[in-house]
Image: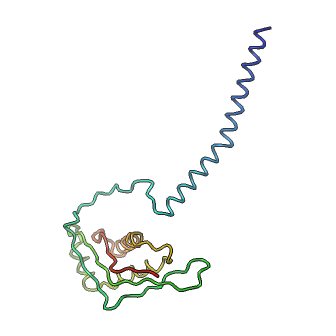
Amino acid sequence: MKKNILTIVIMAATLMNLVLTIVLIFAVMPAMNKTGNLVDKVASVIDLEIDSDKDEEEDYAITDLVTYPVEYETAKTINLQKDPGDTSSHYAQLNGIVISFNPNAEDYSDIYAAVESTSVYIEDIVVATIGEYTVTTINESAVKQEAVKRIQERYNTKCIVDISLNGLVSS
């Protein structure tokens, strides 16, 4: 009689363990996955870096960079996108751009000469990049990163490594 009761208790505990495991797998795990995906999306929206993308080694020192300034006689006014529900117009002003070149790059002399002869393409890329933002979403570092990426694609080079936005003001 004692063996049968002990067997029934063990069988009940095993069934409870099985039921709780099933609940864990089918109820809790999907919720945890959804929460993890939500955290990933929020982190990407606010520009947090989850995975390190610094695999590329930079072959230049900051002291080696060659700069080329593009100054405007008067501040350039750039229209910004409107936020949803916003009826007023917003704009950004830019006094100039400083383009930083890596002199150790293979195509440095060609790219520098091309930019020196006409920097209008770089100016257009920077203006277009700034114009894609709204007054609430504009972020100077994000604008610079996106503009450098587009400039590198336009000139098909890694010689242009950074830009500085002189006097960027938005309102």
Which residue is the extreme one toward the bottom? 73
Question: Which quarter of the rendering shows the N terminus?
Answer: top right
Q: Residue at x 23, y 63 (%)?
A: 60
Q: Residue at x 69, y 33 (%)?
A: 20
Quadrant of residue 16 within the rendered picture: top right
Image coordinates for residue 158, horizontal then vertical, percent: 30, 68
Indicate whether 103 appears above or below 55.
below
Q: Residue at x 72, y 19 (%)?
A: 10
Image coordinates for residue 154, horizontal then vertical, percent: 36, 76
Q: Residue at x 56, y 85 (%)?
A: 88
Viewer-nearest residue: 138 or 50: 138
Which residue is the extreme one toward the right? 1
Which residue is the extreme one toward the top? 1
User: Going by the image, does 51 lie left or right of 40?
Assistant: left
Indicate whether 73 appears above or below 5.
below
Image coordinates for residue 71, horizontal then vertical, percent: 29, 85
Viewer-nearest residue: 150 or 68: 68
Image coordinates for residue 164, horizontal then vertical, percent: 32, 75
Viewer-nearest residue: 156 or 136: 136
Indicate whether 118 appears above or below 132.
below
Quadrant of residue 159 within the rendered picture: bottom left
